[in-house]
Each structure stands twice: as C-alpha cells, then as structure tokens.
Amino acid sequence: MKDRLAAAGVLTAFLGLWQMVTGWGWVSPILLPSPLATGAYLVKAGQEGLWLSCLSVTLGRLLTGYGLGLAGGLFLGFLLYTSRLARNTIGLAALGLQTLPSVCWAPLAILWFGQTEGAMYFVVVMGSLWSLALSVETSIRSVPSLYLKAARVMGSRGWHTWATVMLPAALPQMLAGAKQGWAFAWRSLMAAEIYVTIIKRFGLGQLLHFGRELNAMDQVMAVMVVIIAVGLLTDRIIFRPLETYLRRTRGV
Amino acid sequence: MSFLTLEAIDKTFPGPRGGAPVCALNQLSLTVEEGEYVSLLGRSGCGKSTLLAIVAGLEKPDRGQIRCRGQVVAGPERHRLLMFQDAALFPWLDVLANVLYGLNLVENLTNAERLSRAEKFLEMVGLADCRRFRVHQLSGGMRQRVALARALAPDPDLLLMDEPFSALDALTREQLYADLQRIWTETKKTILMVTHNVREAVCLGSRVVILASPGQVVADERVTLPYPRTLNDLKLTAVAAHISCFLQTEVEP
Ligand SMILES: Nc1ncnc2c1ncn2[C@@H]1O[C@H](COP(=O)(O)OP(=O)(O)OP(=O)(O)O)[C@@H](O)[C@H]1O
Ligand SMILES: [Mg+2]
C-alpha cells in the first residue's frame, strides 16, 4: 500500500510537470501535447469507438503473427536441439537474424506481399521467430540430465520422456522465452503497421502514422499510451499469472 | 547361471582439463545371485555410484561386460531400477504423482491398482499425509523417502540404491530397515545397495562387498545372521566391528 502511494505520487508529479511545461507555453503543443490534450483525445477516440476497432484489428494481427511465430519457433527449436546440421546452419542464421531490427524486413515484405495482411504477418513472424526458436532450444538443452536418467531407469522412452520430462522441465525457461518473443512480435507489428497501409483495416500503428502526417501530436501521444497499456496488460493478464503459478508449484 | 554378472569392468572418466583421466572402475568382477541383498561399502570416490550407473545401463563400461539374467546389459530398462544418490524427484509433479511415475510405466496394472500401490508405499515411508506436497515443500529426508517409495513401487527385479538412507533420522531409518527387510524377504527381489554406514550394510545385506579405489573388489563376505535383523543386535554389532576394522586397516584412503 505504501509502495503504491509512493508510486502514484511520483507519477502525479511527473504528469504535473509535463502539464506545467506544456500548459504554460514553454514548449509548443505542436512539439509536445499536454497530458490533458492527450487525455482528451483518448476519451474522444474512445467514444467514437476508434480504440475498439483499431485494437481488434491490431490484436487480431498480433495473435495470428505471434501464433505462427510460436509454432514455427517450437518446431525450429526442436530441430535445432536434435540436429547438429540444423544447429550449424539454421542456428547460426537465427543467431544473426535475431539481432536484426524487424523494421528491416518491411521493404522486403511490401515487395513480396504488397500492402496486405500477409506482409504484416511476415514482419511479425520474422521479428519473433528466431528468438523464439533459440529460446526453445536452450530451454530444452538446459533440462538437468538427472531428470532424464531418472525417467529412463523407470522405463520411460522416446515420446513418453519428451511429454513427461523434457517439456515440463523446460517449461519455465520456455515461458520466459515466449514472453520475450511476445515483446518482439508487438514491436514488429507496430513497425509493420506504420509501413504497410491497408485502408479498410486500420490498426494502432496506422493511427500513429496518420497522426504524424496530420501533425496531430495528441493523437500520436494517445496511441503511444494505448500501445504501452496493451503491453502492460498482456504481461499482467497472460504472463504474470503463468509465472506466478510456476513459481508457486515449483518453488523457484 | 547367476542373476547378475560383471566381468572385468573398466571405466575411466576424462579428468580435469590438462589432468590425467580418472579411473573409476578397474577390472571389477562381481556376481550376484537372484534374491541376494548386496551391500556395497567403500570410501568416497572409489566408484560405487559409477558401478550402479553401469549396472543400470546409464553408463557404458570402457571394457568388460554386464549380464543380467544372461542378457547383455545395453541400456536402462525398468526391471533394473536405480534410485539415485540425489533424490532426483520431478519438481513439476506432486509427491503422489512422483511415486506414480514409475508405476504408470508398468503394464498389466489398472489405474486403481497403481494408485493403491503408490499409497501403500507412501504410507510405508510415513508420508501418506504429504501426497499433495510439492517437491520444494519437502525436507531432504522426506525427499529421500519419496524417492524410496518411487523406486520400490514398480517392483523391479533388480533394485539399485545409492545411499538411500543417508539423509534420514535414526528412528525413521530403523523403521525403514524393518520395512525393507520385510519387502525383500517377501518378494525375493535382488538388491544392490551402496552405503557408508557399516552397521546398516550388515543389518540389511545378505552379503557385504567392499570396494577400494580405484574401483576394485577387496572383500566379499556373506552375512549369515537370520532375518529380521535389528541394528542393535550384539552379533550384528560384532560383525560390523570386524568390517569397520578391516576398512580402517586394509583399505587405503
Ligand atoms: N561423470 C563423471 N565425470 C568425471 N569423473 C567422474 C564422473 N563420475 C564419477 N567420476 C569420478 O569417478 C570416481 C568415482 O566416482 P563415484 O561417483 O562412483 O564415487 P562413489 O564411490 O559413489 O563416491 P561417494 O561415496 O562419495 O558417492 C571419482 O573419482 C569421480 O571423480
Ligand atoms: Mg556415490
């Protein structure tokens, strides 16, 4: 409670300072909108149903893209674990591609897929797949061999060992990797939505992009707030409970 | 034909970087008959755990052959079950599910039979009330007892135990000695048990085998005292004293 009060205090002070700097005209509102203006836009756009429509489009893309990345990452991760050849080729490529900022994929995506959903998914998958694959591989690799031995002397083999030992033992690390992959996917999607324009399906990234074109910085700022909120909420709603569950049951 | 034969087993591990390799077993030969309870004694690091791992099929010997029931041991198999020196319980399962793990791999059992057997052994090790506990909620000794229940429940033909009682208090230990003797005399299974406690070795073993570094058998004695034995029996104490004396004088550190 005391921590929360302190945090709220600091936050209010920060907002107050921001309001002062902008409200008293020290900084032009064209460069930096005031928190009140940003808030006003947030509310107005909310009443128009803009957030609802943008969020449903954007989150739909994110889920599809991330789902594809996750499936591919699991598959590639297992491949990297089992095949030395894959490790020396795909593994090396993944290590390099993982460091490539996902915006770099946007030109190619537009060239190959045009201004389509496909281009969006492509950027999201490329932005998250490699880190997901590598983290799946390392999570499996770091399962203590004692567990595997214990399972084997009790008669476990092949698929049974995978399902009952490898996966549950690797789960906490895989979850950490999935969380990081999620963050990568989210950033990639914002890059994709800024570059790829689909008029009929308007996402958060496009809203931000057009805010810039119209010099409507309150709009840009409000979209940024929503993007951050989505990031925080997914952490709280999806990843945090899973982490807590694992910590509670395994005591790590 | 003997139940288990080890013929001239050599096992060397790579040593530290730049150092000489470590010889863990050196021309070790041993035969075990069906239904024997062999206690293995020896100083720390003389190769006892390595011997069990090789019999379990987890490690391959450099040279030599192990046969169990005439079959060459090529890998792990559930009829030769090893209970590890560290309990090696699965932290993603609760206590009951850990004990059920090996039972689930036994064919020809209904799930109800599996459950009742798991509960029976949990009861035996005194943890019936802890069936829903998670591994991290158990003390070291409780973990060891769960591991013991997990190893006994699937009823393997050959049970390999690596210091199964090292973390237990004296009372629980003596209780489990009695239980283990009863199980052994009833089921006539073959047991190979590593221990550092000479009296424990004599109390449980129908035979005491002493290893010395590097991995050789230096003594092999039959213990003829009648079962059930208790730790404080005078004859048992005398045999144990004799073996302790042998260990101190004959087995070089
Ligand atoms: N995986 C391994 N790699 C390298 N050396 C090993 C390995 N396992 C065992 N050794 C070496 O082999 C020797 C025998 O080890 P082992 O674990 O069999 O001893 P032990 O008799 O069980 O000892 P303790 O009573 O302390 O458990 C030791 O010198 C050890 O350093
Ligand atoms: Mg040992």
Image (cartoon, rainbow, N blue to C red):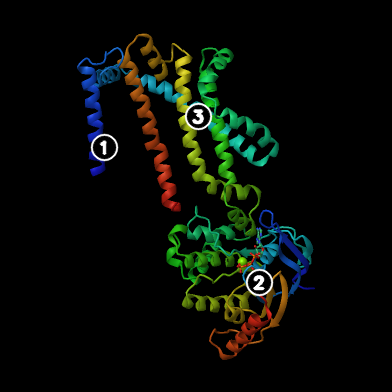
The quadrant the N terminus of chain A occupies is top left
Left/right placement of residue B241 relative to residue A35 reads right
Question: Where is mark 3, residue-wise?
Answer: A66
State the residue lying farthest toward the front: B18
- In the image, is the residue at mark 2 within 8 Å of ligand 1 by its beta carbon? no
Q: Nearer the viewer, residue B42 or A84?
A: B42
What is the x, y in percent for residue B108?
A: 63, 60
Residues tagged 3 and 2 counted as in contact (Cβ below 8 A): no
Query: Residue, x 37% and y 29% (percent of image)?
Result: A230
Query: Residue, x 75% and y 67% (percent of image)?
Result: B26
Determine if residue A79 is in view.
Answer: yes
Question: Where is mark 2, residue-wise?
Answer: B192
Indicate which disc, 3 or 1, sits on the residue closer to the N terminus. Answer: 1
Q: Mark number for residue A244?
A: none
State the residue lying farthest toward the left: A24
Is A47 located above or below residue B11 in the figure? above
Q: CA distance from mark 1 to mark 2?
A: 62 Å
Left/right placement of residue A210 relative to residue B39 reads left
Of labels 3 and 1, the one closer to you: 1
What type is the residue that disc 3 sits on? Answer: Tyr
What is the x, y in percent for residue A236?
A: 37, 37
SS label for mark 3: helix
Residues tagged 1 and 2 counted as in contact (Cβ below 8 A): no
What type is the residue that disc 1 sits on? Answer: Ala
Question: Where is mark 1, residue-wise?
Answer: A7
* Chain letter, disc 3 residue: A
Query: Residue, x 57% and y 31% (percent of image)?
Result: A130
* Chain letter, disc 1 residue: A
Q: Are marks 1 and 2 on the same chain?
A: no
